[in-house]
Amino acid sequence: MNSNRLRDAILEALQPRGSRVLSFSELANRILQPDLDPVREDALRAAAAELERRGEIVRVKGERLSRIEFTDFQAGTLAIRGEGRAFLLSRVPGVPDAVVTGLASALDGDVVLVRLAAPRSAPKGPHTRVEPRETGVVVKVLQRRRETIVGKIARGPEGTFVVPFDRKIDARLAVPDGKDLNAPTGIFVEARITAYPDDRRLALAEVLGLIGFEGDPGVDVEVVARKWGIPRAYPEAVLAEAEAANGVVGTDERKLRSDFTGRTIVTIDGETARDFDDAIEAEELPGGGFRIGIHIADVSHYVPIGSALDAEAFERGTSVYFPDRAIAMLPERLSNDLCSLRPNEERRTLSAVLTLDRKGETVKSEFFRSLIRSRARLTYTSAGEFLEESPSSPSKKSPSSAISSDVAVLLRAAQKAGAILRAKRVSRGSLDFDLPDADVILGETGDVVAILKAVRNEAHRLIEEFMLAANEAVARHLEFIPTPALYRVHDRPDESRLADIRVVLGPLGYVVPEDEEEVSPATFQAILDQAQGKPEERLVSDLVLRAQKKAIYSEECRGHYALAAKYYCHFTSPIRRYPDLLVHRALVEWLAIRRPPAADDAEGRTRWFHEAAAHCSSRERRAESAEREAIAWKKFVFLSSRVGEEFWAYVSAVVGFGLFVTLEDIYVDGLVPISSLGDDFYRYEDVEHRLVGSSTGRIYRLGDRLRVKLVKADPEKRGLDFAPVGDSRGARRGPRTSGPPKPQPKGRGRRPSPAPPRGKTRRRR
């Protein structure tokens, strides 16, 4: 048996209909007889250890094994939240996180085994809504999240310590004499944990390297990257493979590829982009309809399975885009050279050519390993200006003067094709988050010199529609072959999230149906359309976005709820996302053999894709978190010099200790502490998400627009405190809308989390 089959056999042997608790020898006799031998026994022992590490089985009554669901243990990720509160994340909809009262040596993010006790009694009362939570203590750390820590050096009478940059690390890290590299006080360092926390939450660490002082150029991003464990350098074997890659297409290979070098094909990217991994073409067909081509760099040619490049790309999972740099998934030789579709250079590509009818329906999908030669490298600005000017009367200084006639024809055809694709998507109920955002403009030293409202133009929308169409077409094709692949799935919101959004949007006059099955993407799109141009537009967009589940990768093709797409995958960016590379490989294999894999082979691949999906989803979350944190730090530094200035903001969350607000236009988040509302004593009403003045009846609630003054910038917490000023002090007393109050459905009362820091990141569908 292979390892997967052994793990399945162990779980099967521990099912209720058999003996729930078995010693290892009993397990071996049951699974391996009559072929019990030392090699197979060692393989079984390794499989059992892996199941223990995953938290699927646990040792009870000494060394006997049981499936964890039949015990009073639970495994999961430990999360440390404000004021040292610890929870075991349930990850099950409707099941609350367990409260962890004893941490042992565990740190935030570790996968731990917890022994659960009976839930604490819930308070009695007519308005009790909170279900009692289970409590427990950590008995074992199954997987360590981190071996290194980033922090500042602090020295005092008790010795030298590393003060963690990550405030969720609730332990003191003492540095023994001779292990500090003579680091000066206050400098950021990276340290290796040599002993995890004891009962006093004291750990030991040794300094591995100095990073720099806060405020030095590039230190902020370097600290964030190291905190999240994002590698900056490539192993020598990876660089060697990349440098050895050959961009010359030989005669034999040329016979296997479709030659599209004579076609008019262009790239459209941002002004500062260096990796052009997608190109498009479009033409109108006689009698109506369009033929569009989406040509993606053939990264699979340069990153073979089992290579050092492949292992490194899998480990990274995705490129990471910080304000002042990109940490690419692949070395520069590939990402910015051989896999970059630079103009007038022959490049290997994987192409999706789609024939659309008048209504934007795809009537024919064709896929090719191909060769292209881009005619032009266009930017979103230049292409957008061209598309938004009148075709009949371009100005003398218009961008059309710099665009050749054949490229102009392509752009006009692409604009029309994009419009009908968008109309088709909207008609089927697709949800479109065209959120306003802010661009962080950096100076030469990496400091923020301005935060400007970002603009999405016709070129952005055109490219997005082409990429969405290609992703759907490829997913549909792979599902119908069928062949194992990795899909991008987005499940419908659960009832608890819908209950939250009803509570907040109901008083604003927005309707979310009570029946969960009636809430479609079109429902949310109608809410977004209703909010367009109104003061609460950004808040409503944020709330609708927060109500959605997180899109993830999966070996199952479950569709994409927000896009109202039955089939969806990521195909268009293999240069920066490992899942796209896996999709390319599946498509390339089919193009070569034109048949699905054998059943046994398909089963093995599907199992591997299941694990790869979890890994890639985790790496994507890591990248997003790091990108947000780096942006938030840049914004904090930019705002910290403007204490005393006033801004317009809206309330993005209400909590018992104050109001979280988001500054308009630049989308920086901060807190209005309840202590700054000094005109009254305010009580927090969690169901309504509001603060109400006991004497004045003044109300602060989600969506309120306030004039606020920046009163404090805390460099340790990197937090901004504001206070209301002027007429905005003390919001409306009564309901926002006329008419009787709407009845509240069951299940309300969960408080949405504060809005996360926002930054300029690539759109991830």
Image (tube, rainbow, N blue to C red):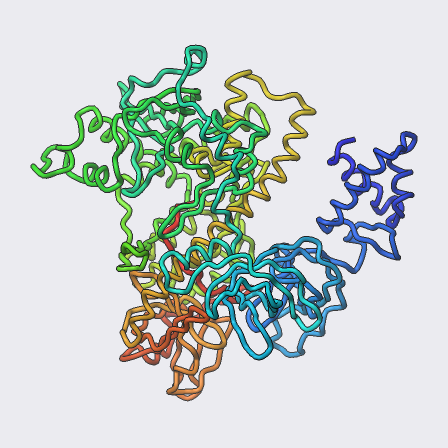
Residue shown at 37% from the left, 65% from the top: 636
Count of marks placed on residues = 0
Closest to the observer, 191 or 10: 191
Look at the picture and state if 387 lies above or below 599: below
Q: Is residue 708 left or right of residue 165?
A: left
Quadrant location of the C terminus in the rendered image: top left
Residue shown at 56% from the left, 23% from the top: 481
Residue at the extreme bottom: 695
Look at the picture and state if 576 lies above or below 125: above
| Location of residue 269 (image quadrant) | top left
x%, y% of residue 372? 34, 22
Q: Examine the rendering and report whether any part of residue 511 can be seen.
A: no
Quadrant location of the N terminus in the rendered image: top right
| Location of residue 162 (image quadrant) | bottom right
x%, y% of residue 254? 41, 13
x%, y% of residue 543? 43, 59
Closest to the observer, 504 or 193: 193
Residue shown at 55% from the left, 70% from the top: 82
x%, y% of residue 657? 48, 77
